Amino acid sequence: MKSVNTDVAYDYVRRRILSGEYPPGHALITEGLSTATGVSRTPVRDALRKLEADGLVTIRAHAGASVKIMDLKEFKEMCDLRLALESHAAGLAAQYRNERDLAEMRHANSEMKRLTGAILKKKSEEPLISELVREDVRFHIAIMTAARNDLIKKEILRLHLINRVVSGQNGTDRATQTKALRDVHRQEVLESHNQILTAIEAGDAAGAKQAMEHHIQDIIDNRLSAMVGAESGLITHELTDEELVYSP
């Protein structure tokens, strides 16, 4: 029962961190979590250690556990690792992809084109933005799957989850850019996806790796720009169900 109870506590705390109910720096008191989840303190402690390994919780001696606050240096280091792994995965995908993988990538890319086109015609991104994000996620997951390397995929997914939580800096992107500028960037993202997909379809490992590296670097540059001069931390925007299960 210890493992089951640990899973209960882990899921309870993790979802509240990702939803924003537990903001950065929020103290995670073992006794309170034990009462809230209906499990003993030992599985709660085990769950907090798992969340620390995920990168969502900080545990300090004599200070206890709290929701992680990510500084700019740590975010840059995480971005560097994601850039290396995801670019390499794209190269592997070009070598090992099958028709099912390609069909998944093409479908996600086609949906992104459709949704982007619809958003370009509207004054606001809502309510289509959540669908667009979901298809973007689907495209990248299809590439990771096609790489046929479970260890790389697991680590990318962990980093991707944290990156999704960190990105946006409390809506900084929305606040500092007009919709016209965001629309231009969406079209650039589509072009990047097209280049990645074309290389993977052709079995061009070097081309796929280069295209993905350019794409991820653009994402990183935009998010670092938004974070510079701001207090860094886990962001509290609502995530989709698919995003909430990223970390294996």
Image (cartoon, grey):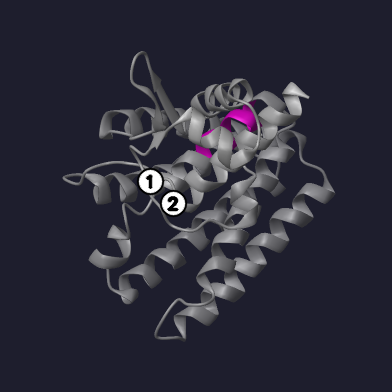
Quadrant of res 147: top right
User: Looking at the image, do the residues carrying marks 1 and 2 touch, with CB atoms under 8 Å apart?
Assistant: yes
Asked if residue 158 is among those painted magenta in the image, a careful observer would answer yes
Quadrant of res 188: bottom left
**Residue 13 in view of the camera:** yes
Asked if residue 88 is among those painted magenta in the image, a careful observer would answer no
Where is 167 relative to 206, above or below?
below
Q: Say which of 130 and 80 sits in front.
A: 130
Residue 238 pos. (x, y %): 49, 58
Q: Say which of 183 and 127 sits in front.
A: 127
Where is 2 relative to 121, above or below?
above
Q: What is the span of residues highlighted in magenta in the rendered image?
A: 152-160
**Side of 147 where 137 appears, left or right:** left
Residue at (34%, 34%) from the top-left corner?
Answer: 75
**Residue 200 in view of the camera:** no
Q: Name the residue that disc number 1 marks.
A: 23
Residue at (51%, 47%) from the top-left corner?
Answer: 16
